[in-house]
Image (cartoon, rainbow, N blue to C red):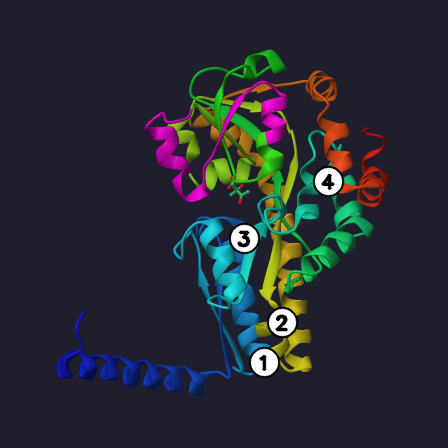
Amino acid sequence: MTITRRNLLAGAGAGALALTMGRAFAEKAEFNYKYANNLPVTHPMNLRAKEMVEAIRTETKGRVDIQIFPNNQLGSDTDMLSQLRSGGIELFTMSGLILSTLVPAASINGIGFAFADYAAVWKAMDGDLGAYIRAQIAKSNLIAMEKIWDNGFRQVTSSTRPVTTPDDLKGMKLRVPTSPLWTSMFKALGAAPVSINFAEVYSALQTKVVEGQENPLAIISTAKLYEVQKYCSLTNHMWDGFWFLANGRAWERLPENLRTIVARQINAAGMNERADVAALNATLQKELADKGLVFNKTRADAFREQLRRAGFYAEWKAKYGDEAWALLERSTGKLA
Ligand code: X2X
């Protein structure tokens, strides 16, 4: 491109416009932060985030203004994580399992068939295991708020066949999020996992690029995956949550009194979101069955045994190390 007087002027004009807009925002609030996520606007995460943003605006008397970008509007999880790290966005909720591409310890709560129920999950994640993971996250200059938000226990859906035993997974083309733990686990179970960002899941299922996927009921419902899937097998194969992350520099920029307010409101919204997801868990199976999804139960023992035989637990215990593994087993009982 040759530099002419004309495009030089156009460039200067655009710069001036950006500056003016920046000032206009700055007059409204001292801190304009962007919060991005990968979930539909109807998911409790976004409903509670909306309330949270209003509560923060009110409590900080307009000094902190957060704009929500739901539903992968700013790109895939992979894209949003790099924007968070560079400061292009200040806040982001991400599954610890995907965050593990940056912070390996962050996937540990996703170990297959580890948690028996929510009581065991919150004991670990609001306790020592969560604190350990947040400390690892902090080393990457990201701040994880204290209360992890619930994604849920994940269930396998498919357009081809129900999964009742590990044998039914053999060779199944299954979408998994981009994370070594997911790939490793479904390979150990004999499936053929394909890593795809959530933004592309609906169309990948619709066009039959993959047969199935796995997600909690709240996502199967709000992302309308039931429209392109036939079976839902209640495997409860792992528990997954969303860390509410802040860019470290953006977080430090907030004066301490504002930081306290923002953290308290985010954690409070997270607790409400957990309750919403729990309530949905209780009603969604019937609702989704009415929409045509065919449900079946499974026995965790058979799947756990298959993972054990494949060396899955031993391999991941060695990766996480004894300290992290011991913290996990404090809430799950002996795994390996
Ligand atoms: O990508 C998924 O499946 C999702 C939405 O559950 C996560 O963010 C891990």
Q: Badge 2 local density, few (<14 within 10 Å), some, or many (20+)?
A: many
For marks 1 and 3, the one nearer the N-term is: 3
Rendered position, 75 above or below 119: below
Q: Is residue 229 left or right of residue 297?
A: left
Q: CA distance from mark 3 to mark 2?
A: 16 Å
Question: Can you say whether 147 is above or below 25 in the image?
Answer: above
Q: Compare marks 1 and 4 and give the one earlier in the sequence.
A: 1
Residue 317 as seen in the image, left or right of residue 20: right
Question: Is residue 119 or residue 104 the one in the foreground?
Answer: 104
Q: State the separation of the CA atoms marked 1 and 4.
A: 33 Å
Upstream in sequence: badge 3 or badge 2:
3
Q: Are marks 3 and 2 in contact (CB under 8 Å)?
A: no
Front one among 25 and 3: 3
Callout 1–callout 4 Cβ contact below 8 Å: no
Q: Earlier in the sequence, mark 4 or mark 3?
A: 3
Circle 3 residue:
45
41 above or below 314?
Answer: below
Per the model, the C-alpha gap separating discs 1 and 3 is 22 Å
Q: Quadrant of the N terminus?
A: bottom left
Q: Which residue is mark 2?
A: 262
Q: Which residues are magenta?
A: 184-210
> Decide: marks 2, 1 in contact (CB < 8 A)?
yes
Queried whether the magenta region covers residue 336, the answer comes back as no
Residue 98 appears in the rendering:
yes
The residue depicted at 39 percent of the width and 55 percent of the height is 73
Element type where label 4 sits in the image: helix
Quadrant into which the C terminus falls? top right
Pointer 4 residue: 118
- Where does the image place residue 146, in percent across and percent down from the top left? 71, 60
**Mark 3: few, some, or many residues within 10 Å (few <14, many ≥20)?**
many
Question: Could you tell me which secondary element the residue under label 3 belongs to?
Answer: helix
Going by the numbered disc 4, the residue's amino acid type is Tyr
